[in-house]
Amino acid sequence: MSYQYIQTVVSEFGTLFSLDLDISHGAVCLQRSDDSRWYLEIIDDAMGLIIHTDIGPSHDLTYDNISKLMELNSNLPLMKGAWFGIHEETASYRLFQKIALAEMSSNLLDNETKKLISLRNMLMEENYF
């Protein structure tokens, strides 16, 4: 039931942008006009969805970069539930946001995705990475 519900929400989210989104394989990638890629990925237990985007290769991270990311992670008013982490499969560091199944809707997915895009853009403009 939860997996089906997530598929429905992602499909409804896609219709907001005239996209036919299929997350039946567990994930879908959206590419924006600025070439950034945004991933919607069903959490293994199907109890929610993770939105994430690549920031850079993890092998480029220095101690100072990691310290800065950890400082940002602890800035709750700025991050608003988002966090930075390492994505092992792609050897990259990414910006993540989780949406729990219990609160999931296409409007919430739209709002959270827009907030994450705004956060990434603001941090890029201020040369955080």
Image (tube, rainbow, N blue to C red):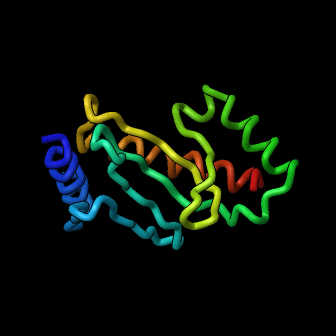
- The residue lying at 33 percent from left, 64 percent from top is 28
Q: Residue at x 34, y 47 (%)?
A: 44
x and y, in percent, of residue 27 in the image: 33, 61
Residue 18's spot in the image, x, y percent?
Answer: 21, 65
* Residue 89 location, quadrant: bottom right
Between 129 and 25, the one nearer to me in the picture: 25
Q: Residue at x 77, y 54 (%)?
A: 127
The front one of 129 and 3 is: 3
Please provide percent x and percent y for residue 88: 58, 59
Of all residues shown, which one is farthest toward the top? 77
Q: How many numbered circles are shown?
A: 0
Considering depth in this image, is 59 or 108 the residue closer to the camera?
A: 59
- Find residue 118 and report its horizontal and vertical position in percent: 54, 48
Say which quarter of the image contains residue 83: top right
In this rendering, the answer to whether 44 lies above or below 27 is above
Tell me if 45 is positioned left or right of 89 in this view: left
In the image, residue 87 above or below residue 90: above
Quadrant into which the N terminus falls: top left
Picture residue at 32% right of the left edge, 40% below the top: 48
Q: Quadrant of the C terminus?
A: bottom right
Would residue 54 be found to the left or right of residue 99 on screen?
Answer: right
